Image: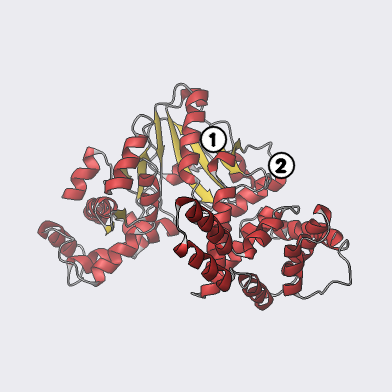
Amino acid sequence: MNEIASPGLFDRAIRRITTVWRDMAAGVSRDEDESIAAQMQACLSGRGGEISARNRAAKLAQSYLVLDEAGRIEFLRTLAGFDSDHAAVAGAYDVLQKAGDEAERASAQMQLRRALEPPRLRLLTQLTTIPDGMKFLVDLRAFLLSRMRGDPPLTALESDLKTLLASWFDVGFLELRRIDWDSPAALLEKLVGYEAVHEIRGWRDLKDRLDSDRRCYAFFHPRMPSEPLIFVEIALVQGLATSVQTLLDQKAPVLDPGAADAAIFYSISNCQRGLAGISFGNFLIKRVVEVLGREFRNLRTFATLSPIPGFRRWLDARAKAEDATLLTDDETAALREVSDAETGLQALATILSRRAWLRDAGLRKVVEPIAVRLCARFLLIEGREKRAADPVAHFHLSNGARVERINTMADISDKGLKASAGLMVNYLYDPAKIEQYHEDYAGEGKRSASTAVRRLARG
């Protein structure tokens, strides 16, 4: 647990909004049926004016929040039950089939579209009218994603909710904001809690990441102004960064941003589980490149220092399967000389499973070139249906980056060694070629890379 992350931060927010909703719900007549289904039906009935409608929606949301897990699942099943009327859909389709001319077909298609629209869409939309209603729906989908388990009605409900959220969270509606040390304390606490790549280990660590030679930008939605959707942390340095431990060293001197020639994106974190599958990352990076390019004319390089979370998992699986195509004869012989394992692949897997190899210059001389070559193959060749096997590689290649360089001893934390044998990769964002690289990958599955990395992958 991060020492400055307040475990009660989100609980406080829930208590505050629950109080607001309870006050609004007090305006609903006590004569109305209190069951969840009846509350939903009352919301759809439209009795009274806008204030009554918002009060009913607030009461419904408040009813959900006080439920336990089983109660919430039942709530969602009830909500999913407000589906399209099968008879109405069948009748509208029959009218369309019998339509004679173009005018009749256009009218029949319109009626069919209306019949297909489930009432639950109106219910979900009504919930956005209450305070923090948008955040409520985002969290609702997060819970739904974790509990669907192949349940068809809940899957259909999730699909409807995702469609609504995708339209409401279109990038054209989002605001890019810089987060710095002067940002509200509650927002800084959330930054700590949402950091998903490199844990923030206290106030000093956070302050260092927001210093004058660092930048942090996030997307916000107007209806969730205090909740970051996704944020990126950037270091302004000289040249491509090769080690995340060096980059995050709290004892390192602060660099004059005017002397920096490179902007290194070293951490990108999605904050809202309920917005999974709704992509902002590609737009975030491009926007930040534009902003930094205007602020610092001296910047010539925009790149990442990225983890390779799938590398060791892939390598260990290939070693277990004794994949004879992985190692050359010379590599196998070199590994057998420094290990008692029966095969080269077993030797490699055994060595990488123990931290001690980092302190042995002889082992490193043998292992690192092999690991780098295999990593290049993993990034540029492995995968399915034109998609890179590594999720971070897929993200950056989709966004128009190219694989620039693979770095050894780049993340020697336990997490970095377990995930990628300490390797990290620089993905380069060339403003002049972002669109071309994006089209190459999205259309043909072509993975752009520097000559050096491409040569390694072929080897």
Q: Mark 1 belongs to which amino acid?
A: Arg
User: Residue at coordinates 89% horizontally, 70% vertically from top-left?
Assistant: 30
Query: Which numbered circle lies on residue 214?
Result: 1
Q: Return the residue found at the far left.
A: 329
State the quadrant of the N terminus: bottom right
Q: Return the residue found at the far front.
A: 100
Quarter occupied by residue 23: bottom right
On screen, 135 above or below 285? below
Query: In the visual, does 424 lie left or right of 335?
Result: right
Query: Which numbered circle lies on residue 184?
Result: 2
User: Residue at coordinates 52% horizontally, 33% vertically from top-left?
Assistant: 253
User: Residue at coordinates 49% horizontally, 49% vertically from top-left?
Assistant: 279
Q: Tag 2's secondary structure?
A: loop
* Inter-mark Cα distance, 2 to 1: 18 Å
Comparing marks 2 and 1, which lies closer to the viewer?
2
In the depicted view, which residue is nearer to us: 44 or 140? 44
Q: Mark 2 or mark 1, which has the lower sequence index?
A: 2
Q: How many marks?
A: 2
Mark yes or no: residue 403 visible: no
In the depicted view, which residue is nearer to us: 157 or 282? 157
